[in-house]
Amino acid sequence: MKKILFLSLLCLAVVAMAGAPADSMAKPFKAKVGGGPTGGTFNTFANAMAVYVPKNMDDIKVSAVGSGGSVENVKRVASGESDFGLCYAVDSALGRAGQLPKDSKKYDGLRAMGFLYGAPAQLVVRANSDIKTAKDLEGKKVGVGNAGSGAAASAERFFRHLGVWDNFKPQFLGYSAAASAFKDGKIDAFWVLVGYPNRSIIEASVQVDIRLIDVGKDATESGFYDAYAYIPVEIPAGTYGEGMPACSTFQDATFLCANVEVPTDVVYGIMKTLWSKDGMAAMAAAKKTFKTMTLENAFDGASVPLHPGAVKFWEEHGKTVPANLK
């Protein structure tokens, strides 16, 4: 009888375990990744990541969430509202130091993972416009990007540095909305901080003859590079049409970032997936801009410490992580 009773109890225990609620089992990690405005490169990457990662990792679910862009992502990721997000290096550094516009809070919960691409500033005007330099914007309506975006933040930094921010009328429009308003003659110029060629600028150029303002010259002559860690670059001739000359400008570095509290194994696993040969190819297929997301570029230009999962990943790939980034 004792043997029968023991076997009966054992069977009941096995049945109970088999019917145990899902809550008692290991759950996949549910992650939110902050992208950017509709039509922007941030948004494209976040959506591509949300599709690719769960397809290649069984223990994680990823959802792309709407965002104004870099500055908003710095705040959300640092606070844990988003687990991951795309952030510009300059915004990340200023956020960590408590120096974001009208915000002295120190967002020190942000950690870098890896470099994605360089985002050059591009100021678009009509080909026949009387705007020749950034200082000619007085009295004009200028699309500067969504409120909370890296584009809007960089525009305010740059134009305030030149002393012209208070002399024109900034319009806080996302890239697609700005291109549409520009085509309709509702604004005189628009600003983007994104990889080239940019779809919104191309859309505008289909209906309106455009040119780019050489903001690199203004940046150099005004000492902008001494004030902020932007990098001088040149947009190649012909980028937005045959005959369009090369244009000097400056760029920020775009990083995939994580909240410091995201488990090390989760960040490490995502990096193994995204920075694999197939993962990098998938991101580049989503948009050619991401072809600079490579093992060689690693974390070049990082302005905040790396996540421990990222440190593990890059050291396994032979990269030396400086002490100030650990």
Image (cartoon, rainbow, N blue to C red):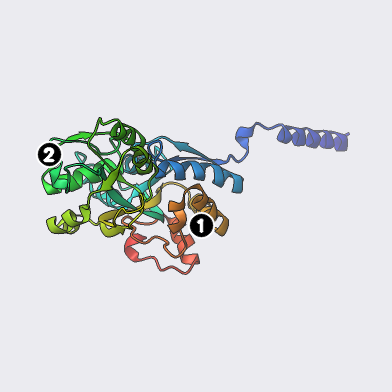
Whether residues under marks 2 and 1 lie with C-beta atoms below 8 angstroms apart, the answer is no
The percent position of residue 164, horizontal first and vertical second, equals 12, 43
**In the structure shown, which secondary structural element does the residue marked by tag 2 occupy?**
loop
Q: Secondary structure at mark 1?
A: loop
| Residue 23 point in image, percent of width and height | 60, 33
Judge left or right: residue 229 versus residue 164: right
Label 2 vs 1, first from the N-terminus: 2
In this figure, which residue is indicated by the disc labeled 1?
A: 275
Q: Is residue 106 visible?
A: no
Mark 1 is surrounded, within 10 Å at the Cα level, by few (under 14), some (14 to 19) or many (20 or more) other residues, namely many
Q: Nearer the viewer, mark 2 or mark 1?
A: 2
User: Closest to the observer: 168 or 319?
Assistant: 168
For residue 9, above or below residue 108: above
Q: Which mark is residue 112?
A: none
Rendered residue at 13%/35% (across/down): 139
Q: Which residue is mark 2?
A: 138
Q: Quadrant of the C terminus?
A: bottom left
Where, quadrant-wise, is the N terminus in this rendering?
Answer: top right
User: Image quarter for residue 104?
Assistant: top left
Please, is residue 311 above or below residue 190 in the view?
below
The amino acid sitting under disc 2 is Glu
In-image side of 62 versus 228 (left or right)? right
- Tell which of 176 and 306 is nearer to you: 176
Residue 249: % across, % down:
25, 55
Within 10 Å of disc 2 (Cα), the crowding (few <14, some 14-19, many 20+) is: some
